[in-house]
């Protein structure tokens, strides 16, 4: 996906999309990845108008023709995000897409590198007891709620993105791989309970890598570096008390490619709580590489 690299206009009114502009629009706060596009595409097929607030440098410009109106904003402009939705009469909104915390938290200037507005600064330094994902996202949702904007799960609009229980690929796990899946599942659930990460890599009942702030793909790559022989299993699960409005585990073509590049052989995900993007293409790529994807 091509991410915007040039400055975007503050507001872009898009031509007719076939949506019913007489109906109340739903808001979409869009970050990186394919998920925001999938949500906008589904809304378009349902005739539901969407007002998108797209995070500059993360969200794809491909969103513009899919929505009624698209506003571009910096990631630290919390007040502007709220005002954009209010200006368009939005009462319900969804969030979709990925934000890499390493990009905004651990640089030389920390969170100040995203040029935050006063509302974001107040949230970051006065209202957060810690900087875990759930804490940050819950605080952001509370800010929107305080202004009458109710957060809904994007999966209310497109529940078909959640994977069903099955072995999705032609290749089945071996007996040893099933043992690694079971072992990794318990470890991943505990990491999720602590809100550290949702992914672990396992081989022969030993943990190779645990996802933290770096994200799933880099955790998989690290597992490959630590286990050059490959043939390991990656387990990705939802948190025990997963809030389906945000940070829902998501896999797709990129995940499969990362697993193949690192030498992994199995991807185990949680059925009914994991988003599988571009399902047909993702499974086809896994079959091509001889990998196994299990939703359990």
Image (spheres, grey):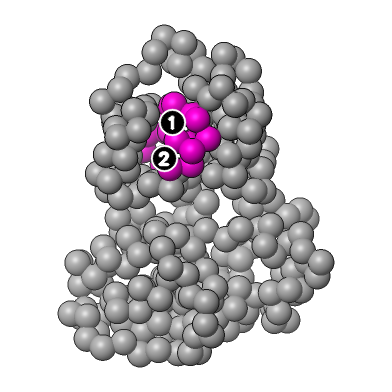
Q: Nearer the viewer, mark 2 or mark 1?
A: 2
Residue 204: x and y in percent read 57, 14
Q: For the residue labelled by badge 2, is the local secondary structure a helix, a strand or a loop?
A: helix
Residue 193: x and y in percent read 63, 36
Point out the stretch of residues depicted in magenta.
256-275
As drawn, 73 above or below 206: below
Q: Is residue 268 magenta?
A: yes
The front one of 288 and 41 is 288
Q: Is residue 23 magenta?
A: no
Residue 94: x and y in percent read 43, 65
Outermost residue toward the front?
228
Q: Which residue is mark 2?
A: 256
Q: Residue at x 27, y 46 (%)?
A: 281
As drawn, 263 above or below 6: above
- Is 252 positioned to the left or the right of 189 in the image? left
Q: Quadrant of residue 169?
A: top left
As drawn, 288 above or below 5: above
Q: Which residue is mark 1?
A: 267
Q: Are marks 2 and 1 in contact (CB under 8 Å)?
A: yes
From this viewpoint, is residue 148 visible?
Answer: no
How many marks are shown on the rendered structure?
2
């Amino acid at each position: 996906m091509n991410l915007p690299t040039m400055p975007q206009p503050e507001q872009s009114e898009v031509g007719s999309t076939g949506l019913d502009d007489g109906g109340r629009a739903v808001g979409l706060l869009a970050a990186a990845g394919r998920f925001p596009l999938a949500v906008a595409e589904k809304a378009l097929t349902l005739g539901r108008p969407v007002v998108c607030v797209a995070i500059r440098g993360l969200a794809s410009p491909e969103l513009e023709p899919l929505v009624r109106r698209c506003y571009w904003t910096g990631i630290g402009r919390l007040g502007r995000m709220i005002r954009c939705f209010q200006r368009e009469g939005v009462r319900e909104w969804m969030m979709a897409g990925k934000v890499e915390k390493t990009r905004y938290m651990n640089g030389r200037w920390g969170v100040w590198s995203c040029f935050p507005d006063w509302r974001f600064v107040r949230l970051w330094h006065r209202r957060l007891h810690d900087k875990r994902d759930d804490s940050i996202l819950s605080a952001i949702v509370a800010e929107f709620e305080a202004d009458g904007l109710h957060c809904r799960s994007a999966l209310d609009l497109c529940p078909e993105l959640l994977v069903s229980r099955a072995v999705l690929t032609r290749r089945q796990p071996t007996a040893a791989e099933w043992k690694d899946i079971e072992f990794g599942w318990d470890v991943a659930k505990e990491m999720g309970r602590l809100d550290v990460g949702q992914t672990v890599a396992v081989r022969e009942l030993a943990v190779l890598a645990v996802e933290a702030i770096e994200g799933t793909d880099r955790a998989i790559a690290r597992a490959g570096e630590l286990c050059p022989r490959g043939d390991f299993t990656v387990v990705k699960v939802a948190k025990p008390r997963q809030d389906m409005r945000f940070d829902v585990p998501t896999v797709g073509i990129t995940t499969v490619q990362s697993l193949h590049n690192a030498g992994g052989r199995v991807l185990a995900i949680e059925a009914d709580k994991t988003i599988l993007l571009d399902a047909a293409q993702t499974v086809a790529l896994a079959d091509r590489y001889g990998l196994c994807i299990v939703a359990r």
